[in-house]
Amino acid sequence: TVLTALTSAALASENIGKVYDLAGCQPLTYVQMMKETARKTGKKRYFLTVPFFTPTLSRLWVSLITNTSKNLIYPLVESLEHTMLARKDHLFSDEWSTRTYFDLLEKASLKTHPSHSLFQFRAQRRTVRSVQRLTLPPGKDAEWVRNQYVHWLPNFLSPLIKVTLEGVNVAFSLFVKKYVLLEMKLNEERSNKDRQLLYITKGILVADKNRGRLEFRVVLNRRFVLAAIHDYNPSLPWFIYKYTQAKLHLFVMKAFGKQL
């Protein structure tokens, strides 16, 4: 709807210099939205109304509970002070007049997941994407960086974490080899001098359904190398992962950057 309106407005000369509002559905409050969503999904939720509005406190707990970026949460919470209603005398279209909030959600859900309605859908497990840009020494490549990484790690993480190298496999264990925390395998077919790709295959810290991978890729006229984790599913609960394993990974990558 938004894209259609933007395109139509931009292509019609009579719209030049005018200001329009877009309405998606019939108006409702945030409380009504949350209550009805809970009812439709079969969840029992309790709501407590307070006589004051504290943007600072609200944005902090919302950011903590939802694990969402502050850059997104802060403007949204601060906007709660204002009504978000489209002005009737500035409407671009009146298509919204018969639609409800749940009509739109149901339609969007069926497009994305044809076999499920909105209220049958359950969010997928959160996945990790982490990218660090490291300075690449002159004349070196991604293969050299990978070799440095797997040979530097055992000394850096000793004695808490044991790193074992077996051919193209790299295993991280807790003290002894028996308790494998995480294992990676080099994909030789998709790797070359400027790109090294290691798939995260198994381990205590790896969820059953996992497509995670660690990649080293040379970029920006060979001045830098990206160290990136893609589509990794941790087995730890997200809140615990965020403040333990994720922090350790960032610490290790920063130290490795200094090593390079």
Image (tube, helix red, strand yellow):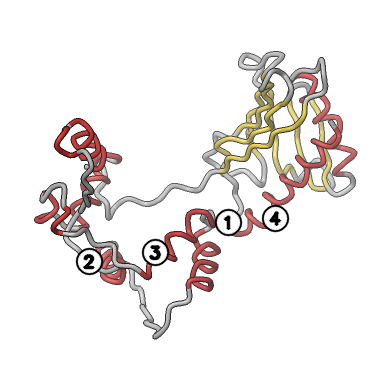
Amino acid type indicated by mark 3: Ser
Indicate the secondary structure of the residue bearing disc 3. Answer: helix
The residue under the point 36% across, 78% down is 47
Disc on the earlier residue, 2 or 3: 2
Disc on the earlier residue, 4 or 3: 3
Q: Quadrant of residue 211?
A: top right
Disc on the earlier residue, 4 or 1: 1
Indicate the secondary structure of the residue bearing disc 4. Answer: loop
- In the rendered image, the quadrant that contains the N terminus is top left
The residue under the point 35% across, 73% down is 45
Using the image as rendered, state which of residue 45 and residue 52 is in the foreground.
52
Residue corresponding to mark 1? 237
Residue 223's disc is: none
Residue contact between numbered discs 4 and 1, judged by CB atoms under 8 Å = no
Q: Is residue 116 left or right of 243 when viewed as pictured? A: left
Using the image as rendered, state which of residue 19 and residue 84 is in the foreground.
19
Task: Measure the alpha-carbon separation of dots 2 and 3.
Answer: 16 Å
Disc on the earlier residue, 2 or 4: 2
Residue corresponding to mark 2? 28
Residue contact between numbered discs 4 and 3, judged by CB atoms under 8 Å = no
Residue 79's disc is: 3
Tell me where residue 63 appears, x and y as whole percent. Answer: 52, 62
Camera-near label (2 vs 3) is 3
In this rendering, the answer to whether 204 lies above or below 101 is above
Q: Residues within 10 Å of mark 4 (few under 14, many from 20)?
A: few
Residue corresponding to mark 4? 244
Tell me where residue 254 appears, x and y as whole percent. Answer: 77, 42
Camera-near label (1 vs 2) is 2
Camera-near label (2 vs 4) is 2
